[in-house]
Amino acid sequence: MFDLPVLNSSASESGLYPVSDVANHVNAARKLYVETYGCLMNTNDSEIVKGIMHTSGYAMTDKPDDADVILLNTCAIRDNAEKKIHERLKHLKFYKRRRGDLVVGILGCMAERMREELVVQKNIVDLVIGPDEYRALPDLVEKAFGGEKGIAVKLSRVETYDDIEPLRTEGISAWISIMRGCDKFCTFCVVPFTRGRERSRAAHLIVDETKRLWDAGFREITLLGQNVNSYEDEAARTDFADLLRATARAVPEMRIRYTTSHPYDMSDKLIETMAEFDNICKYIHLPVQSGSDRVLEAMNRNYTVEHYKERLHKIKELMPGCALTTDIIVGFPTETEEEHQMTLELMREIRYDGAFMFKYSPRERTKAWKMEDDVSEDVKTRRLNEIIEQQQRIATEINQTLVGTVEKVLVEGEGRRDATKWKGRTDTNKFVMFPHLTDEANGQTAGYVVGDMVNVRITKATSMTLVGEVVA
Ligand code: 5AD
Ligand code: SF4
């Protein structure tokens, strides 16, 4: 879903964590570079890893060439995600050749499968560490400098890294993992096997973290979990809707988002809570996966198309302007042409603002792994192209209706490709580009800074991006 590696940047650069906070700099000279693949949970995990390593005295670098330790935080969700890591490892071999003392580690969802690699590719990989073993990192990295290979891939039923302060890079948007793992066992999905069983963090700690982030200058948070709807702090009798309410109340000006929801658990209470608070963004990512009840059942999704549509009805009833995105898989084993047409039809009926669309990729250990992968690659490609094309057309049409409207946009930073423009997102999570305001007198950038909320009149729209100008 989020395929590009997210590069880290130096903590001290961000100014968020004064160097004096760092305990005994045993490894003061050593630099860590982390490269992240996969979902937002992984992005936040990398921040947790950096937090742990920073406390142990490591400095951060965003240049692999400068690093003493290179960690790849991996994703196993589809075969192409894994292939990318193998390619990357080939590159890292050259780094290793140049610098014999470089430590290279594999983290995250591919860890379990990479144990074997550690043996085969001994000369590249020094460490393999699963998502629940990051506390062991400083110790294992230290040993790796002494030539010892390290493996730690056990999954935990309790680890939530509650006491670890993630090392967040600069910016005004922060991710907060509120839970780990997943108990849903969708038949195509490897996550319950790579990230283990579901467990939630304590609600009061999440609320406290939100407050601290506001004080540190963050203006938007995204509460993360594989299935946030089943969040539960048993001790405090707090479900996800309660948690959302508590964070929205605690910091009324913080923009609050969350992802991902499961349609089965999308309760009325949650929808009502979203509707009640202005600072909870009107945007829901609600993966449907397929438009066929038979396929949904084979996927063990536990809902029907009817149930899904009924949930959307409730959402639109309480929040008419709420934006909606989804995930779709084409070519799940036994999916017929007719069932594919049902998915296309459902997408036309719902008219999603956006969609992440994938070809089914068989994953070892899942239930579907035992089914024959009987939809050919050609057919998968064709079906995928059909849904992508249709979705782009619909998203463009939806976004075109925004031309002329004024949207509230949180200024997030300068555009990646065009530094004369700001980038930001609407409440409904649409990406907007708009020019700097310049002060006529001296030609300097004026008016507002990153973190401000501005009104932007939309002048142009494509399927993925809005363009506009700031109005008073
Ligand atoms: N093949 C293709 N897509 C998958 N997803 C999860 N597992 C697979 C798989 N084996 C997709 C689902 C999920 C999203 C995060 O990734 O659509 O919602
Ligand atoms: Fe995977 Fe299903 Fe859990 Fe999502 S809800 S992480 S698709 S098992």
Image (tube, rainbow, N blue to C red):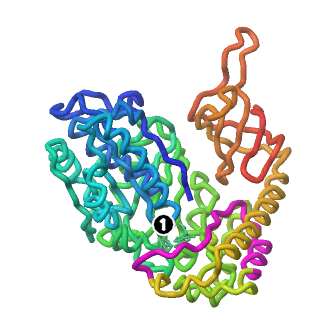
Q: Is residue 241 above or below residue 38?
A: below
Q: Quadrant of residue 20?
A: top left
Observer-nearest of 169 and 143: 143
Residue segment shown in magenta: 341-366
Residue at left offset 42%, top offset 76%: 364
Tell me the residue that label 1 is attached to.
77
Residue at left offset 69%, top offset 73%: 378
Image spot of residue 472 (x, y percent): 76, 31
Image spot of residue 48 (x, y percent): 33, 49
Observer-nearest of 46 and 455: 46
Q: Is residue 363 magenta?
A: yes
Image spot of residue 349 (x, y percent): 79, 74
Q: Is residue 470 above or below residue 330?
A: above
Ligand 1 contact, mark 1 (Cβ < 8 Å): yes
- Amino acid on which the number 1 mark rests in the picture: Ile
Q: Is residue 207 left or right of residue 323?
A: left
Q: Is residue 78 magenta?
A: no
Observer-nearest of 46 and 468: 46
